[in-house]
Image: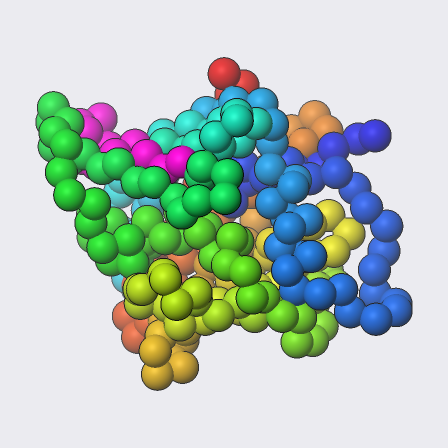
Amino acid sequence: MKRIAYILVLSLMIPVAGRAEAGPWPEGHILLRQVRAALPREPLRIDAELRTQNPRGEIIRVLNARIYFNWGAATPSAEYHIHDRFGRRRERLRISWPPGETPVYEYAKGEPLQEAPVPDLYGTIEGTEISWADLTLSFLWWPDAETVGTDRRRGRFCYVVTAPAPDDTPGAYSEVRLWIDPETALLLQADAFDADGQLARRLQVRSLRRIDEVWMIQDLDVHRFPSRNRTTLRVHDLTAR
């Protein structure tokens, strides 16, 4: 079977499934499980750029990111390296998901990197509009997701799923609303809401690029509200490790 993939920082590789517009809505936790199950089993390295612009299109901040994934390991893990535009190290976050346990985080910063306390995972990274919680897509593991409707994004049929933040996951988000394409298990948009129910951040696929039989997200826009600035994550390269 051909594989369709997209990269949302996590470089999700997704097998093609049948149409799912008709019939009863699948439960939200099942849809999230399908997205998680589609994560690539092989170790990967992703090189990307984070570019922040103001509403006038002026560039405020440019960073580079190198991301390593090993979802097929007995203990799945990911590692995120943030560099400035000249290649100097700024931050590194390691995260692992021991089966049946809460995630484990390790953090370092500076040049050279020095171990440091784990920062606020919902705070912005180095003057961008994106947070560590956004990069890690931690909401895909929230347990009480519910399908609340259907919609279309980028011309694709989607189920709309809401996932409330677990009680043991304190942070800036009270709930995340997800638009999931059931045909590909593709996450096309995620809206995060604060404790007052106000929209706090939006992750939205802007463009895709096909390489051989693989679809990659070329650009992912991240908006933080009420700021009108925008950070675009652009994937430059994907390499099997």
Q: At 60% across and 31% down in the image, what residue appears?
A: 40
Placement of the N terminus among the 4 image quadrants: top right
Confirm whether residue 1 shows in the render.
yes
Residue positioned most to the bottom: 196
Q: At 63% across and 70% down in the image, what residue appears?
A: 146
Q: At 34% across and 78% down in the image, what residue appears?
A: 195
Relative to 233, 35 lies left or right: right
- Of residues 173 and 3, which is closer to you in this image? 173
Magenta segment's dominant SS is strand
**Which percent across, then down, holds residue 2?**
79, 31
Relative to 114, 141 lies left or right: right
User: Where is 168 relative to 76, above or below?
Assistant: below
**Which percent across, then down, holds residue 207?**
57, 49
Q: At 51% across and 53% down in the image, what residue appears?
A: 141
**Which percent across, then down, holds residue 127?**
20, 52
Relative to 217, 84 lies left or right: left
- Give the residues drawn in magenta, as a range: 81-96
User: Where is 49 relative to 111, above or below?
Assistant: below
Confirm whether residue 235 shows in the render.
no
- Of residues 231 and 167, which is closer to you in this image? 167
Residue 178's image quarter?
Answer: bottom right
